[in-house]
Amino acid sequence: MQRLMDAGETPAQIFKSATLTNAQTLKLDGDIGTVQVGKRANLLLLRQDPTQTIDAYAGIAKVILNGRVLDPSELTANAAH
């Protein structure tokens, strides 16, 4: 992400690229890429606005995965095993 910033992209453009643009590229934007009724919703809940700063991605508050709300520490603890 930092390289995209260095190339002149804004945090909002990077966020869109990571979500909607990738979904459109994969032709999956009818199912993922935005938060809408009827779409799959695996989400990262961040402490800061990712359209304002790329540092927001370092502050994950919660993860919603397959309908389950998880604490990020649960995921990292499982990854260590």
Image (cartoon, rainbow, N blue to C red):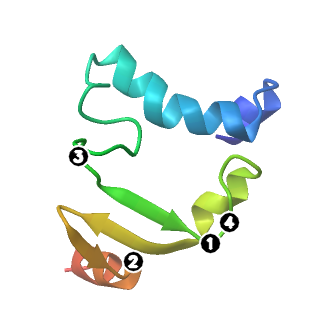
Asked if the residue under mark 2 is in contact with the one under mark 1, i.e. CB atoms within 8 Å, the reply is no
Please tell me whether mark 1 or mark 2 is closer to you in this view. 1
What amino acid is at disc 1? Answer: Arg
The residue under label 2 is: 72
Tag of residue 47: 1
The residue under label 3 is: 40
What amino acid is at disc 4? Answer: Gln
The secondary structure type at the circle numbered 1 is loop
Asked if the residue under mark 4 is in contact with the one under mark 1, i.e. CB atoms within 8 Å, the reply is yes
Q: Is residue 12 left or right of residue 79?
A: right
Q: Give the vertical position of 77 relative to 3 (above or below).
A: below
Please tell me whether mark 3 or mark 2 is closer to you in this view. 3
| Residue farthest toward the front in the current orientation of the protein | 37
Indicate the position of residue 11 as horizontal and vertical percent values: 72, 40
Classify the position of the C terminus by image quarter: bottom left
Q: Residue at x 76, y 50 (%)?
A: 52
Within-10-Å neighbours for mark 4: few <14, some 14–19, many 20+: some
What separation in Å lies between label 1 and label 2 (alpha carbons)? 12 Å
